[in-house]
Amino acid sequence: MLGLWFSCWTGIDALVTMWTSPSTPTLRASMNLSYRARVAALLSDSPLTSEAVITDVRHLLSHGEEGLAFDTVCSWIYEDALPVTREYHARLVVMADELGTPRSVRRLEELLTD
């Protein structure tokens, strides 16, 4: 939409689109970095204790698989029936919504501790 507005003016809509479009590699990379950092923070704050699972999640993150890494964290929390706080659960729900994976957190409410 921003590109269309600028095209009426000067014809620089290609530049505007390039810098504002989520398909721009630089912007997409920064979005992935943000997701990567946030999933890594969720992993760090998670109740997971299995070094093998933690290593797997870090490996997925290092290969740009933020969605799969996030789903793995949620799956193992549920699989191991690990307790989660409401605050941590809320962070998981926000991340799931942003990643478009609401199913990842669907059953985690059963594990709330407060």
Image (cartoon, rainbow, N blue to C red):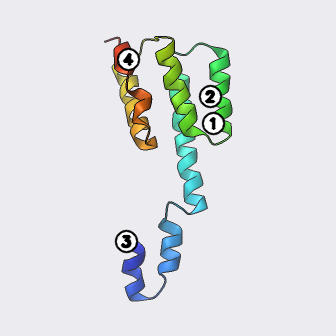
Is residue 114 at all visible to an observer of this figure? yes
Mark 1 and mark 4: span between their CA atoms? 24 Å
Residue type, mark 1 in image: Leu
Q: Quadrant of residue 8?
A: bottom left
| Residue named by callout 1 | 61
As drawn, the label of residue 1 is 3
Would you call the spot at circle 3 few (<14 residues within 10 Å), some (14-19), or many (20 or more)?
A: few
Q: Earlier in the sequence, mark 4 or mark 3?
A: 3
Q: Determine contact: label 1, label 4, CB under 8 Å.
A: no
Mark 4 and mark 2: span between their CA atoms? 21 Å
Is residue 45 at all visible to an observer of this figure? no
The one of 42 and 1 positioned closer to us in this rendering: 1
Q: Earlier in the sequence, mark 1 or mark 3?
A: 3
In this rendering, is residue 66 above or below 107? Answer: below
- Classify residue 93 as left or right of residue 36: left
Residue type, mark 2 in image: Val
Q: Earlier in the sequence, mark 2 or mark 3?
A: 3
Secondary element under disc 4, as helix, strand or loop, is loop
In this rendering, is residue 67 above or below 82? Answer: below
Mark 4 and mark 3: span between their CA atoms? 40 Å
The image position of residue 4, as x and y in percent, is 39, 78
User: Image point 56% across, 63% down: which residue?
Assistant: 24
Mark 1 and mark 3: span between their CA atoms? 32 Å
Q: Earlier in the sequence, mark 1 or mark 4?
A: 1
| Residue named by callout 2 | 57
Viewer-side label of 1, 4: 1
